[in-house]
Image (cartoon, rainbow, N blue to C red):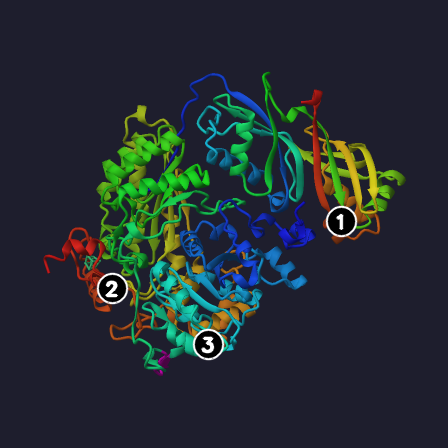
Amino acid sequence: MVKLEKELFYPRHVLRQVEKPAQYLGQEWNMIDKSENMDHGQDMLPMIRFGFCFPDLYEIGMSNMALRIIYNLLNQRADVWCERFFSPAEDMRGFLHKLNIPLVSLESKTPLNQFDIVGFTLQYEMSFPTILEMLDLGEIPIHRTKRTRHSPIVVAGGPIVYNPEPLADFIDLFLIGDGEELLDELIDLYKTWDRNKESRESFLLRCTKLKGVYAPQFYEFVYNADGTIAEIKRTNTAVPQIIQKRIVKDLNKTYFPDKPIVPNTQIIHDRAYLELFRGCSRGCRFCQAGMVYRPVRERSVDLLIEQAKNVLDSTGYEQLGLLSLSTGDYSELPELGERLIELCSEQQINLSLPSLRLDSFSFDLMSKASQTRRTGLTFAPEAGSQRLRDIINKDIRETDLLKAAKIAFTGGWHRIKLYFMLGLPFENEEDVLEIAQLAKNVLQVYHDLPSELRKRRPQITVSTSFFIPKPWTPFQWVRQINKQEMEEKQSLLAENLRVRTLDYQWHDYELSLVQGIIARGDRRVGQVIEEVWRNGGWLESWSEYFSYERWLAALEKYNLDPDFYITRERTEAEIFPWDHINPGVNKSFLLQEYKKSQKGQLTSECNISCNYCGAMQYETGVCLLHVKQD
Amino acid sequence: MKQECVFYMSNKTNKNYRYRLAYSRTGAMSWLAHLDLLRNFQYACRRAKLPIAFTKGYNPRQIMEFALPVGVGIETRKDPVDLELLEKISVESIITKLNVNLPNGIKIESAKYLDYPVKSLMSLVEAAAYTLKTDNLGPATEKVILVDSELIIVKRKRKGKTQEYNLRELILKVEIISNNEVKLFCKAGSVANLRPDMLLKALYERTEITKIAALDAIIVRDNVYLKNGG
Ligand code: SF4
């Protein structure tokens, strides 16, 4: 019989007293176990142990595409074993503390501090305190300066790495951009490091030779009296002045995880995914992903269909999702749609179609796809008025939206969700009221239908979140609205949405404020994150654990004014904490976009014309359409 | 704009073929909640490419029925589960196909084809056998179940109503195997059901056994007994 204690690692009485104990035990289908390659000692090649850390709970992290890609990609290498770490939930964390058990991997139950490289994925700002908690539970000094010769190298990357400064005190190396190739190179370089002969500093310095690697210890910030940045100084001239984003040029040749782990406990998106393309050609001015993932690079239909088959076969999933910023923009959507529908109906798979365009083609596709069930439809006009939609470069007309609503009601969809942002730059009362008006107009479309088409009462939900200005967007200069403005806008909208069939859902504003501070935070914000964590904040992305007061107290302790980060409008000349990172788009392009927004001028999509954002330097993807005209 | 789409094929043949499998679970897999175990089985059936039968209607589900839900932290040895397929295939092939597609720790031990109609597997369940192991479990169980006479009331919620049972009445037979091992035969199923954690609770509340020792117990469900032998 199996030795259970060894397999379970945790005492049974602990597992019996925590919720969903299976989340800590691993052993899922498609999990990769290389322990056999490890046990033979001498004659085996040394195995590089990579700890992939997702700073949130299992149920959140296991849905993440970056995890699926990196995990399977690294484990393809015979000389690497990549294992997973998630944040424990509160109950389990209590037991870890009480019983003095460190944070261990799901695969081999090895403590975090015994890994060679520990990598955090940065998906959202509020997970930053969780990073400190995980390092601490894993018995790795949270400050990079306190790490010794034997500590793991702590790296971080992901969609919000483009302002790494709030984490600069805690992370040894930031990996900027697509990780696929960069991680490979980093591991190769790591293998040349002899911890007994070469210092940690010297090795980290060597890492900065890899394109896309940012080692914060070699950079210093000089501040002006008003708190803004005077200079970003290198302390060693061997490191690059500007760290350029890495990209994978050809998605058709890039690794795709067709054997993702099938989790043992329910997670938020328990389904197979396809990645149609990276990047987005739209250029919405509030959207960071749309800027930092440039240029658009697509996968071919044939490859996608093959990947769909493989991933469904290997997992047994009954749901397939498409994972891209704007699925409807995929250049060969008609063909892909048709073939996916064929595949899915053959295998009885649910297909979810996110981010389609508001055109009749999309409805055709959806009608074909959903032969039996009409679930909710979501539209994201983002702003209520045409004026404001022009400002943010969101190219949706009200007439298109109403037309789409009509097709939807007629086609049997009766639940429609409308998604907006409050607090966009240059927003006035009128713009807020127009959100309510737009929702009412959608409702009116329903009432105008002939009675035989009005079988089910419509359910229209307006959902708003607060706009948070993000680095590397045309709105990185603007002020974020304060708490009072948030309250006012929200109640103004709520008052005007008091209609029986209209529902209103809103977001927590205190969380949005803190998110705003971290998003555009500088290196000094790191102390605040640490202080919040020291005062018990660790799962701050969960509203039940979040405490606004704790953040305010921490800011105060370090004499930092929240308004400096939130409501202050930045001048054109201001040096940003992220100016030494370059995601491919130029600051001058962003500024030009910001100015156009003030005049309400639209910018065309990349597949129509090029606006010379800077991403042309990568010589790939959608930019190639425009090369000849240069 | 975003939409979830659902596909399903209507079941063209009228006849489904019903199989009764017996599965074991050990190690990490014994810590899955019942619904997670069910999902694991469903995914395995798909990976195995078995001709799965679905329920009819707007929300088609794979036809699969467990005799008795299993609690978190309980191993099984031969728990019954029924499966319906659209084609008749050999039981050997079902067993092999599923076993290569189930995670380590879940295993189909046996299977048989049911050539008679079955309405509900769950309603057939009468009793279950468990083995429990932890330090000093033997004497503690002996005292609480066999020696003491005081009532041990356990509560159970069913259809919104709370029912009360005397724990001893749910137990059909106790065998003290050793100082730290006990075998238990008890009522199971939808009418009266003993959950082993009820017993553990009674033990740490009423004897010298500590809560930690009680909760550290290995619990194995050795068998589930069906009416007429199932
Ligand atoms: S260089 Fe032109 S085509 Fe390429 S991403 Fe930028 S704007 Fe789009």
Please determine if labels 2 and 3 lie on a single subunit: yes
Say whether mark 2 is within 8 Å of ligand 1.
Answer: yes
Image height check: is A266 above or below A511? above
Q: A594 or A176, which is in the foreground?
A: A176
Q: A500 or A415, which is in the foreground?
A: A415
Furthest toward the left, the residue is A629
Categorize mark 3 by other alpha carbons within 10 Å: few (<14), some (14-19), many (20+): many
Element assignment for label 2:
loop
Q: CA distance from mark 1 to mark 3?
A: 48 Å
Which of the four quarters of the rendered structure image does ligand 1 lie in?
A: bottom left
Categorize mark 1 by other alpha carbons within 10 Å: few (<14), some (14-19), many (20+): many
The residue that label 2 is drawn on is A585
Image height check: is A403 above or below A243? above
The residue that label 3 is drawn on is A200
Part of the protein shown in magenta: A219-227
- Can residue A377 be seen by looking at this rendering? no
Amino acid at pointer 2: Val
